[in-house]
Image (cartoon, rainbow, N blue to C red):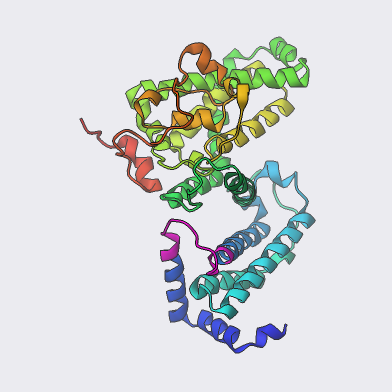
Amino acid sequence: MDQLQTPKLKEAVRAVTKSSKLARAVGDTGNLLKESGEIRPGKGMVTSIVALTLSFLSLLGVMAFHFPQYLTTPELRHMYSVEVMRKVLFAALLVAGALSVGNLILGQKRSFNAVAFLMVLVAVFFGGSRVPVGNFPDHTPYIGLDWFIVDLLGSTIIFIVIEKLFPLYKKQAVFRKEWQTDMVHFAVNHFIIGLALLVVNFFIHRIFGWMVHADFQVMIASIPVLPQLFLCILVADLMQYGAHRAYHEIPFFWRFHAVHHSVKTMDWLAGSRQHMLELITTRVLVLGPLFVLGFDKSVVDMYIIVVGFQAVFNHSNVHLPWGPLKYIFVTPDFHHWHHSSEAEAIDKNYAAHFAFIDYFLGTAVKSTRAFPEEYGVVGDYMPDGFLKQQAFPFKKQPE
């Protein structure tokens, strides 16, 4: 507590509380978040980024505690303990506060850490980890704020570590070009999860409902778990393969899928770049047959975990020795080729889970090189920015 009395920290707190200096600090932080490139150690940038990230997510967490019926995902809120979440939130606030205070005292990235410290103060002012949670209705419209927080923390901790331990491109920066656009895609995809599920379920029942046969579903559900999971993933991948191939080979559909392919740097965040209509359409086409066939709910839940992991991992900046497994399962090696703009990779490697589908159907890339060198859409015509990319398919295309 003695540190709180130091002149440097008092000066920093006064700077935060003055509106003009606060506006300048926020502006400096905003400008810094627009930048990209390698982080140079020794200047407090890494700890400043951790402080800012944790303080921001902690503030969102406090909001979720205040309005759980509107800001948390029903499927998740029944899985985790409120007390455990309180401890996690308290730890995040403590770490964010300590790092931002430490950097302010040392005079490192003052604007950055002043904003982080302010968000910690605001979070604590609004109750911090002690916000009471009473009974609330369970079937209200919601934004998946908790899913965004959990997935962002988990993905950054797991996949950034993996990318640094087993990198394909060793000099690739964590904050590579256009990371801001893909982070917006990541956030929006999580925030609209409730609306997306409603839309997907509506269309699944409308399109596939007439195909349901109860006796056949009972037979599928009676298959042991592991064979049923394999069959579930195979059916999903065959449907995904067909939809994916159509996105590439039908010009109108390509307008939407080109958004996903416009990523020029592959990492764990790259897979988040998708057009909203493609995201919903693909889920309907893939989950519809699983609904018709009647796979057990636990099996479908396991499939969702598998597809969630592979969707992130296969876009990541990772290279591992897969051996013969690369001919069976989709790996980063396999999927990186799909995102290449090089001639030998165009319209190849469509599968999401099982690489043998592409080998069997003759759409696997045949190259003597392990990885491509260029990514993105041929001609690099996709605009940067989330809203511009969502609007792109509806604009007149060049001849």
Residue 1 image point, x, y percent? 72, 82
Please name the residue shown 55% across and 29% down the image: 202
Q: Position of residue 55 (x, y in %)?
A: 60, 65
In the foreground, 279 or 14: 14
Residue 41 part of the magenta segment:
yes
Question: Number of labelled discs?
Answer: 0
Extent of the magenta region: 31-47
- Near-viewer residue (241 or 280): 241
Indicate left or right for 13 with 66 as reference.
Answer: left
- Asked whether the viewer can see residue 203, the reply is no
Quadrant into which the C terminus falls: top left
Q: Is residue 31 above or below residue 314?
A: below
Q: Position of residue 182 (x, y in %)?
A: 46, 46
- 7 versus 266 height, above or below: below
Name the magenta segment's main secondary structure.
loop
Picture quadrant of residue 220: top right
Residue at image x 61%, y 46%?
165
Q: Position of residue 299 (x, y in %)?
A: 71, 26
Q: What's the residue at 31%, 36% (across, down)?
A: 394
